[in-house]
Amino acid sequence: FQEAMLSWPAGARPEDGSWAQYWYHSLHRSTGFGEYVPKTDPFPDSLKPLLAECQPYYRQLSAVAIKA
């Protein structure tokens, strides 16, 4: 990890590809990471079975994640 990885100059990059003008508007304006904003919307009922299926994998990965 290097501190310089946390910020970058605004603008397009050659490696963005031909779809950049359609996909990367906010990325091209950004110069770093924004502050974390917790989600407040309830989790959609239609996706709860998928959430339940994914949670064991998430817990496994979270147990070995590098913590800040």
Image: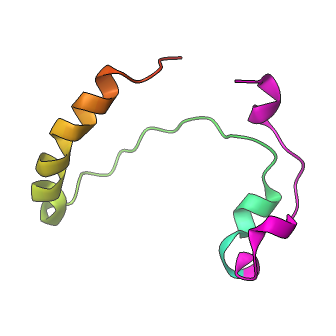
Q: Is residue 67 above or below residue 31?
A: above
Residue depicted at 14% across the width and 66% down the height = 46
- Residue at the (31%, 31%) spot, across then down: 61
Q: Is residue 17 magenta?
A: yes
Instruction: Determine the residue located farthest toward the top in the rendered image.
Output: 68
Residue 24, image x and y in percent?
A: 70, 69
Give the residues in magenta.
1-21
* Residue 42 horizontal/vertical position (percent): 25, 51
Is 6 contained in the magenta span?
yes
Q: Left or right of 51: which side holds 68?
A: right
**The N terminus lies in quadrant:** top right
Q: Is residue 50 above or below residue 52?
A: below
In the image: residue 19, left or right of residue 12: left
Above or below residue 49? Residue 22 is below
- The answer to whether 54 is drawn above or below residue 11 in the figure is above
- Where residue 48 sits, quadrant-wise, is bottom left
Q: Horizontal and vertical percent for residue 12? A: 85, 66
Q: Quadrant of residue 34?
A: top right
The quadrant in which residue 35 appears is top right
Q: Nearer the viewer, residue 39 or 7?
A: 7
